[in-house]
Image (tube, rainbow, N blue to C red):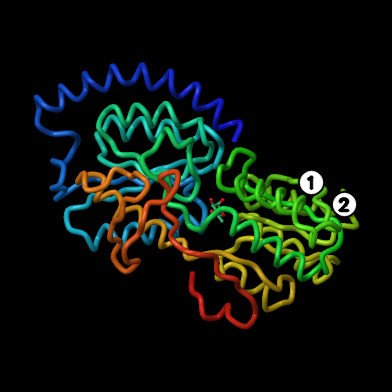
Amino acid sequence: MKLFRQAEGRASTTRRILAVAAVATAAAVALSGCAGGTATSPGNAKSFSIAFVPKQLNNPYTDVELSGGKKAAAALSGVSYSVVGPNTASASSQVSYINTLTQKHTNVIAIAANDPNAVCSALNQAKTGGAKIITFDSDTDKSCRSLFINQVNAKDVALVELKQMAEQINNEGDIAILSATANATNQNAWIEFMKQELKSNPAYAKMNLVTTVYGNDDDTTSFQVAQGLLQSYPNLKGIISPTTVGIAATARYLSTSSYKGKVILTGLGLPNEMRQYVKDGTVKEFALWDPAKIGQAAVYAAKELVAGTITGKTGDTFKAGSLGTLKVGADSTVIVGGPTEFNAANIDKFNF
Ligand code: RAM
């Protein structure tokens, strides 16, 4: 939160500078009669271009998320859909991709931010050029986007992860978090809520979070970090990994180690990646949502933003195909659904 306040200070200075540029751009657009590569006018978005900028390309979670976006774009006529982005999830790795999209006059940039602030000035330039900005999966500072498509309420994610851990360690013992990158807005929000809950919920008084480590959403790094964690904390009872990359790598490490079945692993995972570890007894329970729904919701929201039928303000509603009508809640955030818990009894019912 402190980070956001500092960023807002910087952002308001940037906003003042950009406001001047925006007036000039708006005048130029009015003269040319077309904002961007495809013609759009408020209330009549027949065609538009949307580019997804995920945290990183080589991440199976990203692939599922984007498959939902691609399908939705194909279902709506006149949508030009593309995906660009870095191979690593480091803080500023997305900036050059945003700049290229701005130059190409892409109508909507949908980004899962690797850092709440590092991409903001690039996004603000895109906005000045006429683009609409949507964040999905991992937010920016809220001044840098119109709308955030969030999978699940952040606190609910934290609560389900702690509940699954507490149940398996009988509410007692040392635990650690193996996260994605240190700057990731989504993981940091979930971790913050976990810390608050550990402090305030008497049921968790005997659970002790000893450390948070980062595998950077890289499979090899996450595997090594999991190994190092257990060397440093041999009495660890459990690991919570709120990242699909982290939990799969940690499960792989545990599955062939002497810790298998002894150190509890929970967190957020893709059922297709975790199935083998549930079946071999390495993992009992974990959680997630259907990532494809986030991509789908982003495309439908983009259509309405370009058309001017929504602006992203709290209370706006829009139709999102099979997801029905979605509502924009507090902080211009859309919550797509709740978390699903996976275990041996239901995992075979899911295919993502
Ligand atoms: C990883 C990424 C992504 C997150 C999921 C749960 O794939 O960090 O941002 O939402 O895990």
Residue 47: give x, y in percent of width and height.
16, 49
Rendering coords of residue 46 (x, y %): 14, 50
Residue density around tag 1, few if under 14, some if 14–19, many if 20 or more, within 10 Å: few
Q: Is residue 161 visible?
A: yes
Res 272 → quadrant: bottom right
Left or right placement of residue 4 versus residue 286 in this view: left
Question: Residue 147, position in %: x, y?
Answer: 38, 44
Gap between marks 2 and 1 measured at Cα: 9 Å
**Marks 2 and 1 close (CB-CB < 8 Å):** yes
- Amino acid under disc 1: Thr
For mark 2, give the secondary structure.
loop
- For badge 2, the amino acid type reads Tyr
Horizontal placement of 25 versus 172: left or right? left
Residue 84 position by quadrant:
top left
Residue at left offset 56%, top offset 53%: 154
Disc 1 designates what residue?
211
Residue 244 shows up from this direction: no
Reading the image, the residue beneath label 2 is 233
